[in-house]
Amino acid sequence: MRGKVFAVVLSWVRKFCRTKVTVCPEPTQFLQIARCALLAGQWQQAADAYTEANVSAPADLYHAGFAQVKLGDTIACLRLWQQLDCTHPDFIVQKEQVSLLLIEELHCHLDKNPLTQETEVRQLLEEFSLAYLPSGGGLRLARLWQEERLEEILASADETDWLQPTALAVQAKAACQLMMAADITIPTAQARHFINCWLSLLFHPEAGPQSEPQRQALLDFGADVLRRQAARQQDNGASLHRQWEEELALLRRMGRISAMPILTPALALQAKIADQLFTLIQKSRDAFADSSEWMAAGAVYSSAAQALLLVREGDYDGAMDTLSELEEVDDPFVAWSAAQVRTVCGLHYLSNGQCRKAEQILINGPAHWTAELEQQLLAAIERDDNQDGTALAACLGILTLLPENAETGAVFCSTLTNQVVRLRSSEEASPKLLAAAMRKAVVLNPNDDFSQMIFDQVRRDLALTEISEAFDRDCFAEAARIATASRFPQAVEQFFETARQVAARIERGDYADQEAAVFTLNELLDSVSLVDSSHGAVRRIRRVLDGLRIEARHESL
């Protein structure tokens, strides 16, 4: 009832002012109405009366601003309070709170067009010296945004409170502006920062767009901005696209199972909400298509998240340093992450030609066999320019990870065979390595006749080499076993030919110690007899041996 009385009185006063031009009411009349309306909680009537009264007294200025902020007009409130020279702590706190409300309003206004810095917004920031955000910490983001100091905004990312919608919005818009304005390739870290901020903003329940069409339009725009920038980064462009796609899919799914702010893994770590998101994923198994998708989502928010981020940032050595600790944690998500770190680090070194290092990483702990690893391994085998086959040896080690049911067995078989043919012609690669490579090749594709033929050839080469090496060490029994086990006639022929050569050297007197010569011939005779006791080499060795014995008897007389 009192509110109606105040409204009637105020209406009458205004009408009186308009009609009785020569008789103006005293400001005190408006002040009395304003004060009464204020006590009654009639904020609109109070604000109107204070405006008519043209107040100047500090108390009236304060109450006039109070009425305006109650009506949601923070700008009018601050303009009134700007006239107050008051250092009372309570007033300072109230003024700061209203300033924070205004900043929130301004950035909500910017959200309608994130690519334009409206003149009105900049003027208001300047007018009220709004140089802070709800997150505090002296970030001065509002001032930096007003002055278009984008680099400084991004540089303050480590101090940003990512749970504050305003701070997230400023960072996202600054990153977007920088991406659009850059005529040259910007650092990859800034491009990744754009992805983190832009996606997290668009899926934020408070700061993001309220409708899916609006979100999709902004997503399309962001993807186009990233595409243009990634085109300039030949080495990292694919990685940036992959990050965008993976984190977009993750945030879409997370947004459907939670109403809390869903930040990308990097920002979630900084905001200290990664644990909450990890717990949410643990409880939401049914929201994911399969177990691998579920594990991958949980891994990026688990205690292994930092290691995965190091991999993404290209710090492979740093990521590897975390593995021993991660692999001791009894948690399936962390175990999955550790295997992922091994896989990606191994891929990196493999793609850079460091096949031996890649092998050590991939086979010395759990690793994932992936389509990318498969392609990189094929490429590494094909481009191996080492004539001694060292890279091929490392690739064979990595190939042990290939699942038994892999559909690319025939491709690997063909690739290995072609590489063995090349290395065999160089005569520098180890026959044992070539035989191991072909053994793997024919296992992967037993129906490949050409590979089987090459396998036979390298096995024959290996047998010949091993027989020669055994004779060089005077291991005649070992050479005999190799010749007997070999199904290649060339190996048996070489065995007997080498045995004849040994007997001939002894017969020529190459052994100064006659006793040692006799001992050697006895061992050689036993070994040759094991292979073929009727072979002519047996008779030759016996003749030489008999001659040495006769000579020894003569010398003893």
Image: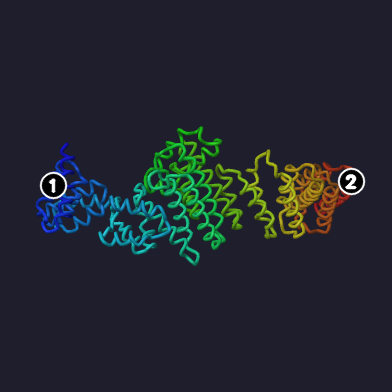
> Which residue is painted at 10% across and 48% down in the image?
32
**Judging from the image, what secondary structure is the residue with disc 1 in?**
helix
Asked whether 10 or 501 is in front, the reply is 10
- Give how far across and how far down residue 99 sits, in percent: 25, 53
Label 2 crowding class (10 Å Cα cut-off): few <14, some 14-19, many 20+? few
Residue occupied by mark 1: 33
Q: Quadrant of residue 194?
A: bottom left
Q: Of label 2 and label 1, which has the lower sequence position?
A: 1
- Give how far across and how far down residue 380 sits, in percent: 65, 54
State the separation of the CA atoms marked 2 and 1. Answer: 132 Å
Label 1 amino acid? Ile
> Which residue is painted at 11% across and 54% down in the image?
25
> Which residue is painted at 61% across and 57% down in the image?
353
Screen quadrant of the N terminus: top left
Q: Quadrant of residue 120?
A: bottom left
Does the image show residue 474? no
Asked whether 205 or 136 is in front, the reply is 205
Residue occupied by mark 2: 535
Does the image show residue 80? yes
In-image side of 68 versus 24 (left or right): right
Label 2 amino acid? His
Q: Depth-wise, is mark 2 or mark 1 nearer the camera?
A: 1
